[in-house]
């Protein structure tokens, strides 16, 4: 115990970071540094972390949270969020899942690599400015639908992401964050073979709105001609709610004089065109 204490006291912050890296701990917080070096002043710690960040040894990805840059990302001095997202969310003590285009990419349904990394978590919203890490896009729910999450191993542990059905619902519900309904339809076209909405009304529909299901159903049915998937979704919708009202396809445009889709009760006030895959 005494030997360990003497070793810690003799260490520099740089040496401690190197030890963490070797030990398989690629992230840490400022609090971790404070606890390890209680005799260091706040200014000394701040200056050292700033210097190591400037040298490309560290990457500050959130207020008070750092990633040790591994060799494969050293040239760009940037680390992709998938490398550290699980550790960051553990640090924030919040549940999460990778969502939208990033979840679609993991599921094999994004023919263009997303420019941003979308993460869904719970309220309250973060008070940290996006300028601190502009690669992360945050979405918020009252609760995380954990029954509809998948997980896989990453370079640094396990990551959680939405399954095909939750991803489909999210990209329609949050279409403004991915480039609109045409982009959503393009992703849905790629995702279709993985979709299975049987028994979705048992729980999944509790995490979205009826309007989102209507829009999703219309896109699958009329735009993508995925009739079998749409039929299952329609049956589940009628199980969940016996009657539903007309809603606009796009909430950004007027539905005055718009054509009606009577099956899904959607005012077709927007033209959806999918990209060639």
Image (cartoon, rainbow, N blue to C red):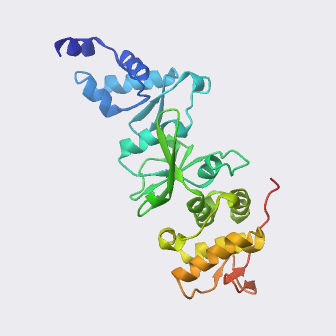
| Left or right placement of residue 274 versus residue 77 in this view | right
Q: Splitting the image into 4 quarters, where does residue 236 fall?
A: bottom right
Give whichever of 6, 76 is nearer the camera: 6
Quadrant of the frame with the N terminus: top left
Q: Position of residue 175 (x, y in %)?
A: 63, 63
Q: Position of residue 113 (x, y in %)?
A: 69, 44
Where 231 falls versus 93 (above or below)?
Answer: below
Q: Splitting the image into 4 quarters, where does residue 73 fall?
A: top right
Q: Position of residue 232 (x, y in %)?
A: 64, 74
Q: Residue furthest right?
A: 276
Give whichever of 75, 201 is nearer the camera: 201
| Left or right placement of residue 161 versus residue 114 in this view | left
**In this view of the protein, can residue 98 be seen by the observer?**
no
**In this view of the protein, can residue 162 be seen by the observer?**
yes
Where 35 falls versus 188 (above or below)?
Answer: above
Where 102 falls versus 81 (above or below)?
Answer: below
| Left or right placement of residue 269 versus residue 153 in this view | right
| Residue at figure coordinates x 52%, y 23% from the top left | 56
Report how many numbered discs are placed on residues in the image: 0
Give whichever of 207, 11 is nearer the camera: 207
Q: Splitting the image into 4 quarters, where does residue 247 fall?
A: bottom right
Q: Position of residue 275 (x, y in %)?
A: 80, 57
Where 27 falls versus 107 (above or below)?
Answer: above
Give whichever of 40, 84 is nearer the camera: 84
């Amino acid at each position: 115990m005494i030997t360990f204490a003497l070793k810690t006291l003799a260490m520099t912050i740089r040496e401690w970071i190197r030890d963490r890296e070797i030990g398989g701990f690629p992230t840490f917080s400022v609090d971790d540094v404070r606890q390890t070096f209680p005799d260091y002043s706040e200014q000394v710690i701040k200056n050292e972390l700033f210097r190591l960040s400037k040298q490309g040894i560290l990457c500050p990805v959130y207020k008070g949270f750092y990633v040790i840059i591994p060799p494969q990302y050293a040239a760009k001095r940037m680390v992709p969020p998938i490398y550290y997202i699980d550790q960051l969310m553990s640090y924030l003590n919040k549940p999460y899942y990778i969502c939208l285009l990033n979840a679609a990419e993991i599921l094999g349904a994004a023919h263009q690599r997303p420019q941003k990394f979308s993460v869904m978590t719970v309220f309250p919203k973060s008070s940290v400015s996006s300028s601190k890490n502009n690669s992360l896009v945050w979405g918020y729910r009252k609760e995380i639908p954990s029954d509809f999450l998948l997980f896989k191993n990453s370079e640094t542990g396990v990551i959680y992401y939405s399954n095909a059905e939750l991803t489909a619902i999210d990209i329609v519900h949050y279409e403004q964050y991915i480039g609109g309904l045409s982009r959503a339809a393009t992703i849905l076209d790629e995702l279709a073979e993985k979709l299975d909405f049987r028994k979705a009304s048992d729980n999944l529909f509790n995490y979205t709105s009826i309007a989102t299901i209507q829009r999703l159903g219309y896109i699958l049915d009329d735009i993508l001609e995925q009739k079998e998937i749409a039929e299952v979704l329609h049956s589940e919708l009628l199980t969940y709610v016996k009657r539903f009202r007309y809603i606009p396809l796009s909430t950004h445009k007027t539905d005055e004089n718009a054509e009606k889709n009577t099956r899904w009760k959607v005012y077709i006030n927007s033209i959806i065109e999918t990209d060639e895959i």
